Image (cartoon, rainbow, N blue to C red):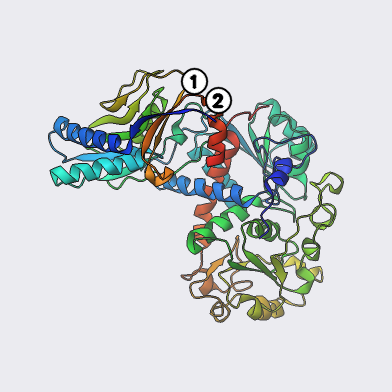
Amino acid sequence: MTTRAPSEKATTSSTGTPGMGAGPRRHVLDLDDFSAAEIGALLDSAEAMREVMDRSIKKVPSLRGKVVVTLFLEPSTRTRVSFEQAGKMLSADVINIGGAGSAAEKGESLLNTALTLQAMHADLIVIRHPHSGAPYFLARHLRSTGVVNAGDGMHAHPTQALLDLMTMRRHLGSLEGARVVIVGDVLHSRVARSDAFGLAASGASVVLCGPPTMMPLDLLRANRDGGPDGGPDAGSNPGPGRSLPNVTVEPDLDTAIAGADAVIALRLQTERQAAGMLPSLREYTRRWQVTEARMALAKPGALLMHPGPMNEGLEITSALAHGPTAQIEEQVTNGVAIRMALLYSLLTGTEERP
Amino acid sequence: MPTERLLMTGEDMRRVIARIAHEIVERNRGAGGLVLVGLQRRGVPLAHWLASAIEAFEGVEVPVGALDTNLYRDDLTSRPQPTVRATTLPVDVDDKVVVLVDDVLYTGRTARAALNALMDLGRPTQVQLAVMVDRGHRELPIRADYVGKNVPTAADEQVRVRVGDFDSVDEVVLVVDASLVAAEDGARA
């Protein structure tokens, strides 16, 4: 069990940003400062949100008059639409800004863009950025506007991890003691990192599997200073890295997958081959592709998940991707529900504009 | 420690349920077309009690649903955040008589939120309200159709309805020194 002590959580609950103090959470930057209890409460609330999604009139008035801006400076369909839909179902006003067509094209700095949005009284900025740490930077400089990390570089993607946790909890009943295999390019995967933190906090054990050149050895080095990989904005990071005793590395997929409750296949970015991190796609496929035969080694009924978009025939076979164990569409549905729960949690309650 | 005064025992509550069950059936001339909808959380077990009582003397199984009003509250930004719980209606409420069931009627704001929540889910022909305790201090033009007990209270007091499903005892108490209640709530959660 790696559940954090409540006192420890209280000191880092908002962002870990100096001077933030305790109080209601304003930002969600990664899952490394979430306790099992906080994750559990969000998943519970997301279950209630799924009921709203199932209605013929898919809208409740909870966030009437709240402004949510999605600032996506990297391509994305599902995450951006998911946040937009989540906001709209809760009656928030959602404004979408992309890289193209915005002042970012004219060279406006990220900070100035964010300050402009804050001056327009945006309540929350949902940011996707190619650089690790960009959301932390904004959270430090914004006074009244909250920040949600929708993926920053190779660092973190907390809402994807939450939807993965929700999907697993729905099917497994509990995350406590579950064995979850994350296979692929873990080193460059913000999804894998956030998944590992969320799963470890929830009492699951995580097995990371893939080419040794793609294993995040730093993540496993307990209690090192600064955040993962020296940290985005290393000097101001929340403090010592989280110790993750429940996370192990197993390069052989057959061994890793044996007895697993769930398998998360990661998207392989084929340009990594050019960077010399992969021998060949053929070898990758032979050793680390999730196949029917390999899934047969997992527990009966084990879940297969993928954060998308998939390279069918590379990290996952087409038959599996569309087979009965695949949770890929379920993940997308849960993604809207968990983002509704998160927006509700961040934008209601007292003292949200200190 | 907050001081508690016992208002109703479990036995008193059971008698009230039996009486209200009869009143509901009398007013609606039978139990056909009725749906009992408990407001999360303690209205839900009370709605089940009413359904059992009605079934016992009327022989009709009345469907019971649960409604969470938190997504419809008007004070979402002025008080600590409540947990959103399940909303489940076993049947379509269109053209039904819906009896909302709650533990305490106070400002009327929960009942207002419940009406809005219900209207998003369908169009009942009639909506009625049944509560275990009416403690006064209404802030909206809302009244209950069925009341277990009228309890005059001061604003700084609290009425706590306890039901076995959540509290391991059935009783209604008046919490006189309510200044410590928030702390107790925190410990309970």
Residue in the image at 54% along x and 43% along y:
A341
Can residue A96 be seen from the camera position used here?
A: yes
Q: Residues within 10 Å of mark 2 (few under 14, many from 20)?
A: some
> What residue is disc 1 on?
B156
Contact, mark 1 vs mark 2 (Cβ under 8 Å): yes
Which amino acid type is marked by label 2?
A: Ser
Which amino acid type is marked by label 1?
A: Asp
Mark 1 and mark 2: Cα distance apart in space: 8 Å
Residue in the image at 78% along x and 41% along y:
A137
Q: Nearer the viewer, residue A109 or A254?
A: A254
Q: Nearer the viewer, residue A22 or A95?
A: A22
> What residue is disc 2 on?
B179
- The chain to which mark 1 is attached is B
Instruction: Residue A229 in the image: state x and y as whole percent.
Output: 82, 57
Is A96 located above or below residue B128 in the figure? below
Label 2 SS: helix
Instruction: Residue B122 in the image: state x and y as whole percent.
Output: 30, 38
Quadrant placement of the C terminus of chain A: top right
Is A288 located above or below residue A124 in the figure? below
Instruction: Residue A311 in the image: state x and y as whole percent.
Output: 62, 67
- Taking A79 as reference, is B63 left or right? left
Could you tell which of marks 1 and 2 lies nearer the N-terminus?
Answer: 1
Give the quadrant of residue B124.
top left
Can residue B93 be seen from the camera position used here?
A: no
